[in-house]
Amino acid sequence: MDSNCIFCKIVNGEIPARFAHRDDRVVAISDVNPQAPTHLLVMPVAHHANIGELSDAADRALTAELFAVASRLGREHGPDGYRLVMNTGADGGQTVDHLHVHVLAGRQMSWPPG
Ligand code: AMP
Ligand code: ZN
């Protein structure tokens, strides 16, 4: 846990959120500023800043667990398709340094992203 991290505080119940999934290792919440009819954030309970840091860690299975939850939620909310996004670092547009997968669904997505 990083005591300055807003997502650690959500995972620990210090800040309220709407949970779409919760198990011992992975949670999913609704984004407060949704960019699509469905906009969820799937994140590990443990604090990892980004996918590179998680990949460097010993817990490789956690990456698979995150994507299993993200793809299940994507399929449920976007039967005709969905988008998974991991903004990483400043150039990637990451604003919260606790790894999370955006699950976007419910509208036609465009490409390229901004
Ligand atoms: P990123 O910019 O990729 O790091 O994504 C961070 C996301 O977290 C943004 O889409 C924000 O809208 C969202 N966010 C920030 N604070 C909260 C919060 N308290 N509850 C839910 N989502 C949040
Ligand atoms: Zn954190």
Image (cartoon, rainbow, N blue to C red):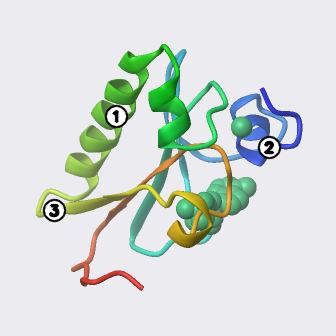
Q: Nearer the viewer, residue 80 or 8?
A: 8
Q: Amino acid at mark 2?
A: Cys
| Quadrant field for ligand 2 | top right
User: Which image quadrant is residue 9 in?
Assistant: top right
Q: Which residue is mark 2?
A: 5
Q: Which residue is mark 3?
A: 81
Q: Is residue 28 above or below residue 44?
A: below
Where is residue 91 drawn, in percent x and y? 55, 71
User: Which image quadrant is residue 33 in?
Assistant: bottom right
Q: Nearer the viewer, residue 41 or 47?
A: 47
**Drawn side of residue 86 relative to residue 75, left or right:** right
> For the residues marked 3 and 1, what is the alpha-carbon distance in whole angstroms?
15 Å
Q: Is mark 2 within 8 Å of ligand 2?
A: yes
Where is residue 14 drawn, in percent x and y? 84, 36
**Drawn side of residue 71 relative to residue 103, left or right:** left
Res 14 seen here: yes
**Circle 1 sits in a helix, a strand or a loop, which is it?**
helix
Q: Residue at x 36, y 25 (%)?
A: 65
Viewer-nearest of discs 2 and 3: 2
| Residue at the extreme front of the image, as rendered | 56
